[in-house]
């Protein structure tokens, strides 16, 4: 009589090989998750900048992206003391430059990321786009840069004076 199946030794060897492969894969999975989170925050920031540029051209008005410590409040405002990772606003900036006035229209709100650290290198509190699509940065330097850091990995978001956005790998 022929019996089919696996012996106990074969099952234990298979489980040992599986455990070794799993132990090798878990750290790689953690890197993949962190890379995905970094990409999500960076992409949201790039989206906000590109949205501001396209809305400025479309509407023929200055559109500003500013950091906000209360982005998710019913009446959000730009913040001079908050951090970029707390959130940001994209709004049509009719009144004072970089300030959400009562007649300004908020276009997009991002509530922030607890895990990321966003450091503005040349931006102060905001970046504005003119109706021509040009960036009106916060300094006379040729490029405005923000560094998004998460778990030891970073990406730079660079905005040139023409308003174009590009990304670079960076170190925290």
Image: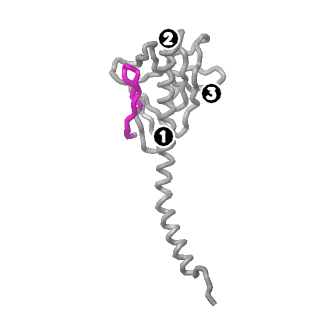
Check disc 3 and report its element: helix, strand or loop. loop
Marks 2/1: CA distance?
33 Å
Q: Earlier in the sequence, mark 3 or mark 1?
A: 1
Q: Which residues are magenta?
A: 157-171
Where residue 160 sits in the image (x, y, percent)?
37, 23
| 52 vs 27, nearest the viewer | 52
Depth check: 165 or 136 in front? 165
2 and 1 marks in contact (CB < 8 Å): no
Question: Which residue appears farthest toward the left when viewing the image?
Answer: 142
From the image, tell me which residue sits under label 1: 38
Q: Is residue 168 one of those drawn in magenta?
A: yes
Magenta-colored segment: predominant secondary structure: strand
Q: Marks 3 and 2: which is nearer the front? A: 2
- Disc with the residue nearer the chain's start (3 vs 2): 2
Foreground mark, 2 or 1?
A: 2
State the SS at label 2. loop
Rounded to the nearest angstrom, the CA distance separating label 3 from label 1 is 21 Å
Disc 3 marks which residue? 72
Q: In the image, 1: left or right of 21?
A: right
Crowding near pointer 3: few (<14 within 10 Å), some, many (20+)?
some
The residue singled out by tag 2 in the image is: 60
Q: Residue 149 appears at what percent x and percent y?
A: 45, 38
Q: Which mark is residue 13?
A: none
- The residue shown at (48%, 49%) is 32
**Residue for point 52% across, 13% down:** 59
Nearer-N-terminus badge (2/1): 1
Left or right side of 88 for 144: left
Describe residue 1's horizontal placement relative to residue 145 as left or right. right
């Amino acid at each position: 009589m022929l019996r089919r199946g696996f012996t106990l030794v074969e099952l234990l060897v298979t489980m040992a090989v599986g455990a070794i492969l799993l132990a090798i894969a878990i750290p790689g999975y953690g890197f993949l998750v962190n890379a995905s989170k970094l990409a999500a925050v960076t992409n949201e920031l790039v989206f906000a900048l590109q949205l501001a540029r396209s809305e400025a051209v479309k509407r023929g008005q200055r559109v500003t992206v500013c950091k906000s410590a209360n982005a998710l409040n019913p009446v959000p405002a730009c913040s001079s003391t908050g951090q970029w990772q707390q959130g940001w606003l994209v709004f049509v900036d009719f009144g004072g430059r970089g300030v959400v006035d009562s007649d300004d229209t908020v276009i997009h709100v991002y509530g922030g990321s607890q895990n990321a650290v966003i450091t503005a290198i040349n931006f102060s509190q905001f970046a504005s786009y003119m109706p021509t699509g040009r960036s009106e940065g916060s300094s006379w330097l040729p490029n405005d840069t923000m560094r998004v850091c998460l778990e030891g990995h970073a990406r730079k978001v660079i905005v040139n004076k023409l308003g174009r956005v590009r990304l670079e790998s960076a170190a925290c």
